[in-house]
Image (cartoon, rainbow, N blue to C red):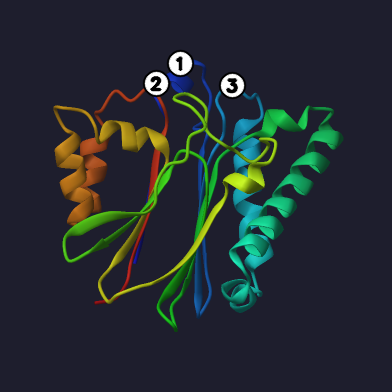
Amino acid sequence: MIFTYSKTGIFHKEQKLDSQDIVYCTETNRFIMLCQADGVSMCKNGRKGAQISCFEAASILSGNEEAFFNFSKRKTAYLVLEQVVYKINREAKKDGNLPESYASTLMFCCIDKQLQQALLFHLGDGAIYYISDGKCSYLIPPSCISSNLCPQTMTKDAFKAVSVKITKLEKGSTIFMSTDSLLHEMKNKDYGMFIKNKIRENDYPVLEKALEPIPNMDDISFIAYQTEG
């Protein structure tokens, strides 16, 4: 079962802009592809870059999922990022923009339903969690160069900051992917623990209702995939 959520933050609402967070999911008989990207707010084409990043990541794996599960981590990181950067450079040239203006983070999870395993790709300040038996732990934590700078698709040497991982999935377990804003809300002294508990409990309808009134400055989005148990 797949759950998705996206909410535009106050900062972008005041500027009459759409959310810079992109959530993109595809599914075939055997594979599920969950993609999430966060366009860099200071980049005028960040949302477009996030869209390109998600679509191209899903595109390059489509029909080649089994091969990617057998590639080295280094090869997977290189092939995906090369494809994303190539498409962004082409888009930027067509529109007369700087490629750097399309910068975004990128995460994806490719799930093999037949073998019950997941291929994870992570670049940026989002996080990927694994939830099983009521316990929630990082599969891949946020990656930051400094307190206010995280690696993204158009960062020089972004390839070196990519994390790739393959993990087995237990029955009834959940993969939970979140951009950075929700991670910040988890630290809130008033409702952060409630958010964490709803994630651990896989209670996403209640989590969504709880997030709606929160005055978040940044965009919030998440994707959750729960295996059959």
How many numbered marks appear?
A: 3
Distance CA(mark 2)–CA(mark 3): 15 Å
Is the residue marked by circle 2 packed among few (<14), some (14-19), or many (20+) residues within 10 Å?
A: some
Residue at the farthest top position: 14
Distance CA(mark 1)–CA(mark 2): 6 Å
Is the residue marked by circle 1 packed among few (<14), some (14-19), or many (20+) residues within 10 Å?
A: few
Q: Earlier in the sequence, mark 1 or mark 3?
A: 1
Q: Earlier in the sequence, mark 2 or mark 3?
A: 2
- x and y, in percent, of residue 144 in the image: 48, 35
Say if 151 sits above or below 35 in the image.
Answer: above
Say if 56 sits above or below 183 in the image.
Answer: below
Q: Which mark is residue 14?
A: 1
Q: Which residue is mark 3?
A: 42
- Amino acid carrying label 3: it is Met
Q: Which mark is residue 173?
A: none
Query: For the residue labelled by badge 2, is the local secondary structure a helix, a strand or a loop?
Result: helix
- Amino acid carrying label 2: it is Ile
The image quadrant that residue 113 belongs to is bottom left
- x and y, in percent, of residue 117 in the image: 43, 74
**Residue 6 in view:** no
- x and y, in percent, of residue 80 in the image: 67, 57
Quadrant location of the N terminus? bottom left
Judge depth for marks 1 and 3 and give the one in front: 3
